[in-house]
Amino acid sequence: MTEERGIDVQGLVREFKGGVRAVDGIDLRVAAGEIYGFLGPNGAGKSTTVKVLTTLLPPTTGRATVAGYDVAKQGAKVRAAIGVALQDVALDPMLTGSEHMRLQGGLQGIPRAERGRRGDELLERVGLSDAADRKASTYSGGMKRRLDLALALLHKPRILFLDEPTTGLDVQSRTALWEEVARLAREEGTTVFLTTQYLEEADVLANRVGIIDRGTIVAEGTPAALKAQVAKPTVELVPRDGGECAAASAALAPFGEAVAPRTAGSIAVRLDSGADQLADIVRALDQANVAVMNLALHEPTLDDVFLAKTGRSLEGAAQEAPPEPAAERERALA
Ligand SMILES: Nc1ncnc2c1ncn2[C@@H]1O[C@H](COP(=O)(O)OP(=O)(O)O)[C@@H](O)[C@H]1O
Ligand SMILES: [Mg+2]
């Protein structure tokens, strides 16, 4: 039955002491086998939503069902149906990868004979076979993430929650994790609820994206549909002389609406009638005697969607983490 793999959230609010409304009345629905990307900057309310949906926090008001069970009233049933990898990975530094898998298998009542095999299989799938007998304290950040994912998958959950699974990972580890998540949805029909600060992650991986900002969902749809809402390309330029910004803005004003630029110090305008205005724009700048150091045309991205809905740039809000060392990359799951 399809609803057994779905998520249904209505009017969900989670308030913390002191009146912070971390989640401020959200509605969303995730269908069976879908990868839902919950995209938003730091502090938007992503982790709080995940904690409510995984029964770690009770909702203040509103209702949510996961796998057909009410998160507030049927916690044990929800927990049996889901796998969770939280943003702050909780591992025992003194236990090895294999020991973590066996312990978790025991907690989840997986028969002893099966525990070892299933544990090994999952460690292999996330590229940790070689490190299976090393203590978790020796693992890199990426390896810890992968062990945590393997643990979340041990009891074959129908629905998987991943809270910022790739934050801080280098590009290769990130891509490998995307592949595994896509495979789970495609081959095993796992429903995936994934939070991220990365536009590209939502764009590449998610069937549908909900953009959350300050506790509310500001846009929702497939990445293509969201981008089509913004539709118009943006031209962005940097004047050679910083003092010419005002003149450049004036020259561009007839072509469309000024929007926040992606890079500080440049000027951006969302074009009213598309890229064929580019020649006219160059002419107008020339007539205004504005020398241009750099001029670029951007097709709409999810960042433009975020910008259009919130007036701020998501890319500026989410800081890229430093890449991991090369040794870690070589062990990235294949
Ligand atoms: N336990 C808590 N007590 C008080 N405020 C909290 C708590 N957890 C989160 N918040 C606040 O709720 C808001 C949303 O946090 P969070 O859900 O962690 O956002 P995200 O995961 O999108 O970064 C933030 O303003 C955060 O400071
Ligand atoms: Mg978070």
Image (cartoon, rainbow, N blue to C red):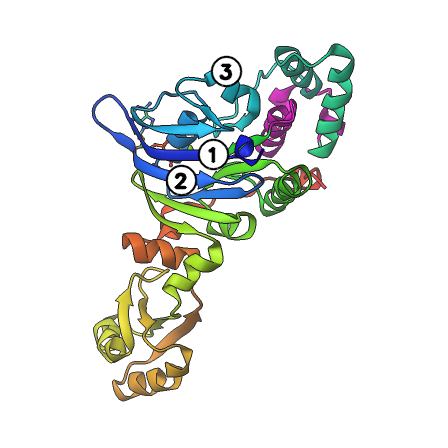
Mark 3 vs mark 2, CA separation in Å? 22 Å
| Quarter of the rendered structure image containing ligand 2 | top left
- Image quarter of residue 178: top right
Work out whether mark 2 precedes mark 1 in sequence or the reverse, and give the earlier one: 1
Q: What secondary structure characterizes most of the magenta part? A: helix
- Residue 208's disc number: none
Work out whether mark 3 precedes mark 2 in sequence or the reverse, and give the earlier one: 2
Quadrant holding the N terminus? top right
Determine whether the beta carbon of the residue marked 2 sits less than 8 angstroms from the nearest atom of ligand 1. no
The one nearer the camera, 222 or 162, is: 222
Residue 302 point in image, percent of width and height: 42, 56
Residue 91 point in image, percent of width and height: 56, 19
Residue 127 point in image, percent of width and height: 71, 34
Pointer 1 local density, CA inside 10 Å: few below 14, some 14–19, many at least 20? many
Residue sitting at x 49%, y 28%: 68
Region in magenta: 128-157
Label 3 sits on residue: 76
Residue sitting at x 47%, y 34%: 7
- Image quarter of residue 240: bottom left
Label 1 sits on residue: 7
Pointer 2 local density, CA inside 10 Å: few below 14, some 14–19, many at least 20? some
Say which amino acid is labelled 3. Ala
Label 2 sits on residue: 28
Quadrant holding the C terminus? top right
Say which amino acid is labelled 1. Ile
The one nearer the camera, 241 or 292, is: 292
